[in-house]
């Protein structure tokens, strides 16, 4: 006896995926994902909602900088068209040209993530502890080269009876600032320089200055 198998309607359908802007989603079940999400993405990258092959990596220089983390990488482009990389690795700072081995230019930095910016063709690095400027010659701590304002003049060493006259604004980038005192009973006037220390956000004065 011959059995006739009935024909079933086709249940297949074509789906077109053109938006991958959601990227990779490991959090939700694959069956619940919207079309713009994917449960698996390997060796690809998503740019402007489209999927492309992830490019590979190449070694820029032959010798490792050693144990430690990369705390920052910045491409420093100078006005004279000179361009090179600045690398913050561990507690050290390096400059690196093309495929050349990085050259150490500063040490003793805090081992922390660093940010960079350029102002007036000079690069600045800040990592929450250190604030360093570099123009391609020698790195310097900003506090060592920043302007030191003379904020008060005519102040008594203890602040009494003369609190002094404000002359310039406080520079928060300096660990100490200067003011000009007059001390004595008026018969032996002299001028000294004292320091203002910032302690827990409060400015404290100390007449540990030197006579001029």
Image (cartoon, grey):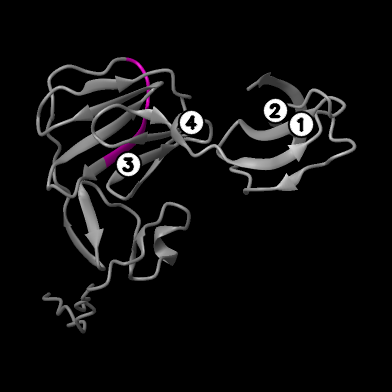
Judged from the image, the secondary structure of the residue bearing numbered disc 3 is strand
- Label 4 vs 1, first from the N-terminus: 4
- Label 2 vs 4, first from the N-terminus: 4
Q: Which residue is mark 2?
A: 191
Q: Mark number for residue 182?
A: 1
- Label 1 vs 2, first from the N-terminus: 1
- Label 3 vs 1, first from the N-terminus: 3
The 10 Å Cα crowd at callout 2, few under 14, some 14 to 19, many 20 or more, is many
- Label 3 vs 2, first from the N-terminus: 3
Q: Is residue 71 magenta?
A: yes
Residue 43 position within the rendered picture, expressed as x and y whole percent measured from the top left: 20, 46
Residue 198 position within the rendered picture, expressed as x and y whole percent measured from the top left: 70, 34
- Measured Cα–Cα span from mark 3 to mark 1: 40 Å
Q: Mark number for residue 28?
A: none
Q: Which residue is mark 4?
A: 130
Q: Magenta residues?
A: 67-74
The 10 Å Cα crowd at callout 4, few under 14, some 14 to 19, many 20 or more, is some
Marks 1,2: beta carbons within 8 A? yes
Marks 3,1: beta carbons within 8 A? no
Number of numbered discs: 4
Q: Quadrant of residue 101?
A: top left
Judged from the image, the secondary structure of the residue bearing numbered disc 2 is strand
């Amino acid at each position: 006896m011959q059995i006739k198998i009935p024909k079933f309607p086709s249940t297949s359908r074509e789906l077109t995926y053109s938006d991958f802007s959601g990227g990779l989603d490991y959090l939700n079940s694959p069956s619940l994902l919207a079309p713009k999400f994917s449960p698996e993405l390997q060796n690809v990258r998503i740019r402007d909602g489209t999927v492309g092959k992830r490019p590979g990596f190449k070694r820029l220089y032959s010798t490792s900088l050693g144990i430690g983390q990369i705390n920052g990488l910045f491409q420093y482009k100078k006005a004279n068209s000179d361009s090179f990389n600045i690398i913050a690795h561990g507690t050290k700072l390096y400059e690196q040209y093309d495929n050349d081995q990085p050259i150490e230019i500063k040490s003793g930095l805090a081992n922390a993530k660093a940010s960079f910016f350029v102002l007036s063709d000079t690069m600045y690095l800040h990592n929450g502890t250190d604030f360093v400027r570099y123009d391609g010659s020698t790195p310097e701590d900003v506090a060592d080269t920043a302007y030191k304002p003379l904020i008060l003049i005519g102040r008594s060493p203890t602040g009494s009876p003369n609190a002094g006259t404000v002359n310039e604004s406080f520079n928060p980038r300096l660990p100490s600032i200067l003011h000009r005192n007059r001390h004595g009973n008026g018969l032996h006037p002299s001028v000294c320089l004292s320091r203002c220390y910032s302690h827990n956000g409060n400015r404290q004065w100390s007449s540990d200055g030197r006579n001029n």
